[in-house]
Amino acid sequence: MNNIGTFGSFTTAQLGIYAAQNGLSVTGNNIANINTVGYTRQNLDQISFRTGGTDRYKSQLDVRVGMGVLCTGVSQIRDPYLDIRYRNELSQVGALDSKLSGLQNLASILDEVAKGKDQNGVIEAQLGELLNTLQNLSNNVNDQSADIQVRSAASALASLFNSYSKRLEDLENNTIKGLDQNIDKVNELLTGIRDLNESIRKSEMHGDRALEMRDERNRLIDELSSYMKIDVIYSMEDVGGGQMIEKLTIKLGNANPDEAVTTDTTTLIDGIYSAQISNKVPQPNPNFNPNAPAGPGNEPFLDAQGQPTTQEEDAPLVHDENYNITVSELRDSRDRVLRGSTEVKLDDNDIQGSLQAMREMLTESGEFASQNYINTVDENAASKRGIPYYRKTLDLLANQIASVFNQANEGYMQDQDGNFLDTNGQIVQPALPDGTILTAKNYDPQNADHKTAMEASTAEKKGGPLFSNRGDRDDTDGITAGNISVSNSWSKGDVHIVASFKKPTGMDVASTDNTNVLHMISLMGTKMDYLPSAVAPNAGNVPMFHGTFQEMLGNIGSVLGNDQAITQIKLDSSYTSAVELDTSRDGVSGVDLNDEASNLMKYQKSYAAACRLMTTLDEALEKLINNTGIVGR
């Protein structure tokens, strides 16, 4: 005896037809969206339909048969593990791509290959021109026009340094704007994911899985992962009445290598709540004492007019000097704060992705980093090079050139034996505190005690600075590539290049002695140490390079080229891995025409079979009702 009534089999056939129709609809939707960005292949979920239980005293000859099929919904085919791997790799690709873009922009300014006269480089060629004019001066020490030619070459060299420095400054400003735009984009993505979470939540509460909105959310999450390393967590949330729906949480992806730091797992999205990020702070008052109470006379901020104030809202927002990022408290679409959430200031290495790469391009100064910065901010700062490194390296070269030539053109008159002389030609014997007599042979102009002793003596000082930090004065402090200029005295003709500091016997000073000019010529080919502390007082005193001016210039290009090459190799490797993962992910989640064609045939045959089943049942029932008991004629 069968447990299905006479008409029950019609229900089975009907459900089969419905299932086949739904399968065809899902397959058609997949095919229609084969080119839709971010679309995830959908699958019809089915279960076998059976009602009731087994009678305790049922006959052993009774056969229990199911009542057909039920469609329980439509699901997406995704591999969460591939999503995790892909997004982690995408954060690496984003970081390396941003870094390489920054290095390429630097190379467009600093790479002198195939540039300048005879393709010898712009600054390189001008250094050569300066050498040529010095050599001409050595042969014509009494020719004022030869001195003017040297001055013109020096002025052109200073202008080139100024130009390069200005272009680096412009690059830095453009990078800052790019970072601000990326932060705005991240905030837009966080808001978009939050709003989609809310829409998906509402749809699920009404029985709709909102698959298309999930696709859009996944697309936004993928894009977010290129800006920072993230950890995506799915959990179930009780919304009351025993109903559980899915909840999405996104946290920072534990990128900081320091295990003591916990801010690198800060929550960015918590269901219908999201944070916003910022790298700006209220304008701080440089004279504020954090160890004393804030108030009149000790205001922590400066207002728009630069006046001290205790009101944070009156202070304009400016970039933090390290472009540190702050994560706000979590808020919903109605601007309500999630209970317990607070603002979090991220550590220097808490994020990994294009945001971090741009931050490091703006902050990292390599060998110019102070020990305090290495100890308190980034322990790997000495090996990271961004725009500040290359700006300071160019500053160091300009400063070195200015320093050695200024030093070479300032000194004291001396006789043929190296004794210092006064204006009357009499020997002067400056003495150090320990009684040592200074002569040209043991005098060190870099030694503070030597300088003090010479300045206190009556020795005749000759020459003056050739370079200064502004063209309208002779100040030699803090000379950089951005401010180097021919000194005011040299430009006006009050100072000339000193041909020699030796006073000829029985002659006027004006002679053909060119020993100091030859000394300057030798400086162009002299290998010397380049100390980071010369332009960054808090940096170390370990030489970052030893070589001539031209070799130092070449080293800048070599370091930059090496950084580019290494970054390119890493990017190619990460990009290849990301493409392979995306291909694998697409193999699972993407629409495949072969599979869909197979599904079309499967559901079409299922539909035809269910229809044939109904026809067969109808014929059998018609026979049962109309022909049972009728004797054949």
Image (tube, helix red, strand yellow):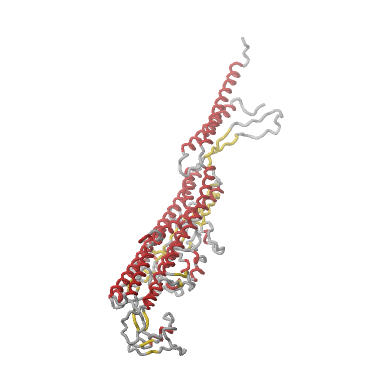
- Viewer can see residue 537: yes
Write down the quadrant of residue 312 in the picture: bottom left
**Residue farthest top in this picture:** 633
Write down the quadrant of residue 430 in the picture: bottom left
Residue 527 position, x and y percent, is 45, 71
Which residue sits at x=53%, y=41%?
Answer: 75
Q: Compared with residue 73, is residue 466 higher up or lower down, i.e. above or below?
A: below
Position of the C terminus, as image quadrant, is top right
Which residue sits at x=49%, y=62%?
Answer: 346
Residue 207 position, x and y percent, is 51, 42
- Viewer can see residue 369: no
Residue 547 position, x and y percent, is 45, 69
Residue 205 position, x and y percent, is 50, 45
Along the viewing direction, whichever of 241 and 427 lies nearer the viewer: 427
Which residue sits at x=28%, y=73%?
Answer: 145
Along the viewing direction, whichever of 502 and 221 lies nearer the viewer: 502
